[in-house]
């Protein structure tokens, strides 16, 4: 999944056209959505891409449920919510997506965000004041997401192995924080290479800057697999 973290429709479409036919998904996150909204999701979909709408919903259950219906109408194939919104919020998000998706003929996957891959173990303890180990927290949120009938979670590939061991084989693990050996870590703290992430049990890899900031994004996408 290529993270289209760009400022608006034009930049997004330029990248999408370069990536056309590669088989990748496109991830529309907060930045692009802030500038171009649901219209850009529809436009990218009409080019044939599957879309992961990465807005990380986190609000009271009723608000999330109602917003979810709108995001399903935009045509997203995958939508995420923060697991830390709690069990009830996740249940309501998943059932709204199924209900609205059934009416439209496209039921998106609903995925839970565990802990952001930009967060270090130190920040997790010092800033959030959570006493258990980060990995233990991630696994516990993933199990809660599965119980709430979410389709999977977003997590660092470093935690993918532990999540795999504690959830069913169908449970999806979407992993950002992917950095091939030839790229920079940027602000990601818990990074793995594409090969390591797949070996750890990732179902989908999310890659942004190593592709989108490359001189030739298509070539960078192909080069992901170079060790
Ligand atoms: O450029 P980079 O490869 O770091 O992009 C990673 C993408 O994945 C960004 O769009 C970021 O918002 C997203 N993401 C993340 N960590 C999460 C969930 C999503 O980095 N836990």
Image (tube, rainbow, N blue to C red):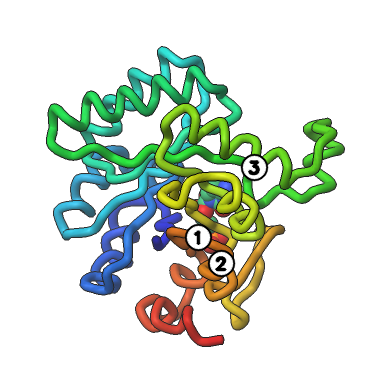
Residue 34 higher or lower than 24, as above or below: above
Which comes sooner in the sequence, label 1 or label 2?
Answer: 2
According to the image, label 1 marks what residue?
Answer: 202
Name the disc covering residue 226, or none: none
> What is the quadrant of residue 6 in the picture?
bottom left
Rounded to the nearest whole Å, what is the CA distance between mark 1 and mark 2? 6 Å
What residue is drawn where x is 23% and y is 37%?
Answer: 107
Name the disc covering residue 139, or none: 3
Front residue (pair 189, 95): 95
Assign a secondary structure to mark 2.
helix
Mark 3–mark 1 CB contact (< 8 Å): no
| Percent coordinates x, y for residue 182 in the rendering | 60, 82
Q: Residues within 10 Å of mark 3 (few under 14, many from 20)?
A: many
Front residue (pair 147, 114): 147
Front residue (pair 136, 65): 136
Quarter holding the N terminus?
Answer: bottom left
Horizontal placement of 40 versus 65: left or right? left
Mark 1–mark 2 CB contact (< 8 Å): yes
Front residue (pair 198, 122): 198
Q: Residues within 10 Å of mark 1 (few under 14, many from 20)?
A: many
Q: Residue furthest top?
A: 62
Assign a secondary structure to mark 3.
helix
| Percent coordinates x, y for residue 21 in the rendering | 21, 72
Name the disc covering residue 197, or none: 2
Quarter holding the C terminus?
Answer: bottom right
Which comes sooner in the sequence, label 2 or label 3?
Answer: 3
Horizontal placement of 159 versus 109: left or right? right
Which comes sooner in the sequence, label 3 or label 1?
Answer: 3
Rounded to the nearest whole Å, what is the CA distance between mark 3 and mark 1? 14 Å
């Amino acid at each position: 999944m290529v993270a289209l973290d760009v400022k608006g429709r034009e930049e997004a479409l330029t990248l999408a056209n370069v990536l056309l036919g590669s088989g990748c998904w496109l991830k529309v996150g907060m930045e692009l959505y802030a500038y171009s909204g649901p219209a850009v999701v529809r436009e990218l979909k009409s080019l044939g891409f599957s879309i992961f709408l990465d807005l990380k919903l986190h609000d009271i259950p009723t608000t999330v449920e109602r917003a979810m219906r709108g995001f399903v109408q935009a045509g997203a194939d995958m939508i995420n919510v923060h697991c830390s919104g709690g069990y009830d919020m996740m249940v309501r998000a998943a059932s709204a997506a199924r209900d609205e998706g059934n009416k439209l003929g496209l039921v998106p996957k609903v995925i839970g965000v565990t802990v952001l891959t930009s967060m270090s173990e130190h920040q997790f303890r010092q800033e959030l004041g959570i006493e258990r180990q980060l990995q233990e927290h991630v696994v516990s949120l993933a199990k809660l997401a599965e119980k709430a009938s979410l389709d999977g979670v977003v997590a660092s590939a470093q935690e993918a192995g532990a999540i795999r061991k504690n959830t069913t084989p169908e449970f999806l693990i979407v992993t950002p924080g992917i950095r091939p050996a030839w790229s920079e870590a940027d602000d990601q703290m818990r990074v793995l290479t594409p090969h390591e992430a797949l070996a750890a049990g990732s179902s989908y890899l999310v890659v942004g800057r190593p592709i989108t900031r490359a001189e030739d994004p298509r070539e960078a996408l192909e080069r992901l697999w170079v060790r």
